């Protein structure tokens, strides 16, 4: 039964596993497939002939669209080279919304400009009536003096105290560089990247499906944000890592009653609609122009202990605290 598949990661080939998912049964699908760059995954070959790779991609993309609800969205992450093919295929079976450019250094691909972004295709199942929420991320500030990086001239007093609406260029989310934060996986994505996608396109309790779950970034983000998930991966080893992280993760990425995305105790994404409610939880300068030099801050600091930190320093589940209350 479909319900038995929810909140689990399933081992196997995604095209086989997709057969168990009914049409229009999940709210969003997100895929971060092998890039065909000969990466050292556990048990699959990441080096197919171009035609073979692309025809395989078209099969799982078609499945993603099939299982997504009419109110839902389809997201595919890859290097621009492959996204150009995906896009022309997706244009036939879904509705283009955005090509999100995620500013992050990528592997050199021969004699080229240094690739510096990944793309995330954002398509919807229907042209209208899909779930979409405007998001905000914090203002960019200079590293040393912490003043606004952009010169807004006389318009500073009109700025939103938290930060601008999220655009289709994401420069504030960094790849996981340090080994101590990484799992044994060559391409693990940052959880707050997935949290942004989930906040953008889903409601609480919605179902997020990821056919290439890896070490479970999508599942973790969904769990933190009170959503359900379904994941597939060929590798039992990656699934074991995911399950161990999930067992220590709490559904608590919230300020009061509103779901937000944190990174290192700072809120990195929130919903524009939630701002009126959330203002009480922040210290905001009385004079709006002061945000040029003063960053708004949470009244009560969260300490979000991740599963990885718990593994390393042995904090028990009960001792994690992420809860925030108005001061
Ligand atoms: C780019 S990684 C995904 C990483 C993931 N986003 C994360 O943050 O951990 C691609 C994953 O797809 C899995 N994979 C490759 N071929 C597959 C297939 N046919 N069916 C299911 N999973 C597959 C690999 O084992 C690998 O973990």
Image (cartoon, grey):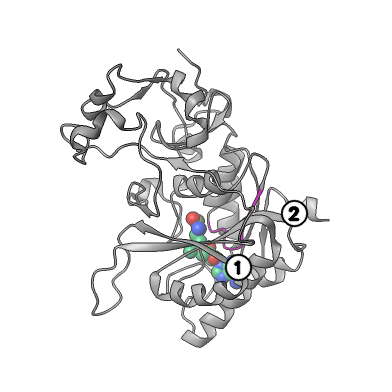
At horizontal 30% and vertical 19% (from top left) the residue drawn is 285
Q: Is residue 81 visible?
A: yes
Describe the element under mark 1 as helix, strand or loop: loop
Contact (CB < 8 A) between labels 1 and 2?
no
Foreground of the two, 53 or 260: 260
Q: CA distance from mark 1 to mark 2?
A: 25 Å
* Whole-percent x, y for residue 201 in the image: 57, 49
At horizontal 35% and vertical 28% (from top left) the residue drawn is 161
Residue 5 numbered tag: 2
Specify the farthest residue to the left: 145
Q: Quadrant of residue 318?
A: top right
* Whole-percent x, y for residue 209 in the image: 63, 56
Residue 242 numbered tag: none
* Whole-percent x, y for residue 90 in the image: 56, 72
240 left or right, relative to 141: right
Locate the C terminus and report the quarter of the image it occupies: top left
Label 1: how many Cα within 10 Å (few below 14, some 14–19, many 20+): many
Residue range in magenta is 207-214
**Dot placed on the residue nearer the N-terminal end, 1 or 2:** 2
Q: Which residue is mark 1?
A: 94
* Whole-percent x, y for residue 187 in the image: 43, 60
């Amino acid at each position: 039964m479909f319900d038995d598949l929810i909140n689990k990661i399933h081992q196997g080939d995604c095209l086989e596993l997709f057969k168990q998912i009914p049409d229009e049964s999940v709210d969003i699908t997100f895929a971060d497939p092998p890039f065909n760059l000969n990466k050292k995954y556990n048990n699959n070959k990441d080096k197919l002939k171009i035609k073979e790779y692309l025809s395989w991609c078209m099969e799982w993309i078609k499945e993603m669209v099939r299982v997504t609800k009419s109110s839902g969205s389809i997201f595919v992450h890859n290097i621009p080279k492959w996204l150009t093919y995906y896009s022309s295929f997706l244009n036939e079976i879904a509705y283009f919304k955005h090509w999100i450019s995620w500013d992050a250094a990528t592997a050199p691909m021969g004699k080229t400009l240094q690739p510096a972004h990944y793309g995330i295709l954002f398509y919807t199942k229907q042209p209208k009536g899909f779930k979409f929420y405007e998001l905000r991320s914090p203002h960019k500030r200079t590293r040393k003096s912490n003043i606004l990086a952009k010169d807004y001239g006389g318009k500073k007093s009109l700025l939103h105290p938290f930060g601008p609406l999220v655009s289709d260029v994401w420069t504030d989310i960094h790849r996981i560089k340090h080994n101590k934060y990484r799992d044994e996986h060559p391409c693990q994505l940052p959880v707050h990247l997935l949290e942004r996608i989930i906040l953008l396109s889903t409601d609480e309790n919605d179902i997020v499906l990821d056919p290439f779950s890896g070490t479970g970034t999508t599942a973790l983000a969904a769990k933190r944000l009170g959503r359900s998930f379904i994941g597939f991966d060929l590798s039992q080893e990656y699934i074991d890592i995911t399950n161990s992280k999930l067992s220590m993760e709490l559904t608590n990425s919230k300020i009061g009653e509103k779901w937000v995305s944190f990174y290192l105790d700072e809120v990195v994404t929130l919903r524009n609609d939630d701002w009126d409610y959330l203002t009480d939880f922040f210290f905001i300068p009385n004079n709006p122009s002061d945000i040029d030099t003063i960053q708004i801050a949470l009244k009560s600091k969260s300490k979000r202990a991740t599963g990885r930190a718990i593994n390393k320093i042995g904090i028990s589940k009960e001792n994690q605290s992420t809860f925030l209350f108005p001061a």
